[in-house]
Structure formats: structure tokens, C-alpha cells
Image: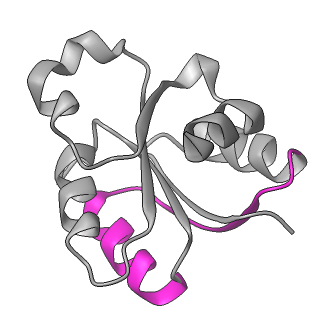
Amino acid sequence: MGRTVLVVDDHADFLRAATALLAADGFEVVGAAATGAEALLANEALRPQVVLVDVRLPDIDGLTVAERLSALPEPPEVVLVSSREASTYGARLRSSPARGFLVKADLSGAALRRLLSD
């Protein structure tokens, strides 16, 4: 199996689509979360290698989730996703500890692997 992934997004349709897409491309999706708080708890319970997190969540935004996860002793690799372009998030995205950023429409197993291998 490929790397383990936790998918975090507040839209159920995207969660289902991303989970199916990544699983079909060799990733092992170990869980899903709909909020930043759920993501932090799921990360603790599941210990995924990668957390794919939407920038815009209903409670804690994905950029803050990335900061909190990166501060852990054994942090997962965090990849941020959004339906908006990276330029929307400006300096905050550029200074994020996240491994990278993908526009949701560009999400694929190959795109995620490229980001993780850089």
C-alpha cells in the first residue's frame, strides 16, 4: 500500500471524491474529517503520513491546522487544498509549514506524489 492519508474537508462530496481518487491511485486513505478540530483528533488517533486539508474549514482554518500539526514531535506531511488559487491566500500560505498546495480541481495521486517528492 502507498502512504497513509487523512483527508480533511467540510464538503462531503469532495471527501468522497478525494478518498476514491487517492485510493484508486495507491494511497491508503485511513480517515476523513470535516473540521479542523476533528482533523487534529483524527491525526492523533490515526497517525497518517500525510494530511490533505482544505484551507477553508468551518472552525479552525487549514493554515492553522498545518501550523499545529507541524509543531508535533512527529508531524505528518501536510498538503493544503482549496477551490481557490494559491494567490488568494498570499503571504500566509507562503509562510505556511505545509509541504505544498493544490487547487482541488488539480488533485490527483500523481500531483500529490510530485508534491511529496519535492
> Residue at 63% of width from left, 39% of height from top?
112
The residue that appears at 89% across and 47% down in the rendered structure is 24
Tell me: 12 left or right of 73: right
Looking at the picture, tell me which residue is in the foreground, 18 or 115: 115
The residue sitting at 36% across, 15% down in the picture is 84
Image location of residue 14, percent across then percent down: 59, 37
Quadrant hosting residue 76: bottom left
Q: Position of residue 110 (x, y in %)?
A: 76, 33
Position of residue 118 relative to residue 44, above or below, is above
Seen at 42% across and 37% down, the residue is 100
Q: Quadrant of the N terminus?
A: bottom right
Q: Quadrant of residue 12?
A: top right
On screen, residue 79 versus residue 88, left or right, reads: right
Determine the residue located farthest toward the left in the rendered image: 91
Report the front residue among 96 and 38.
96
Q: Residue 54 at what x, y percent from top left?
A: 39, 40
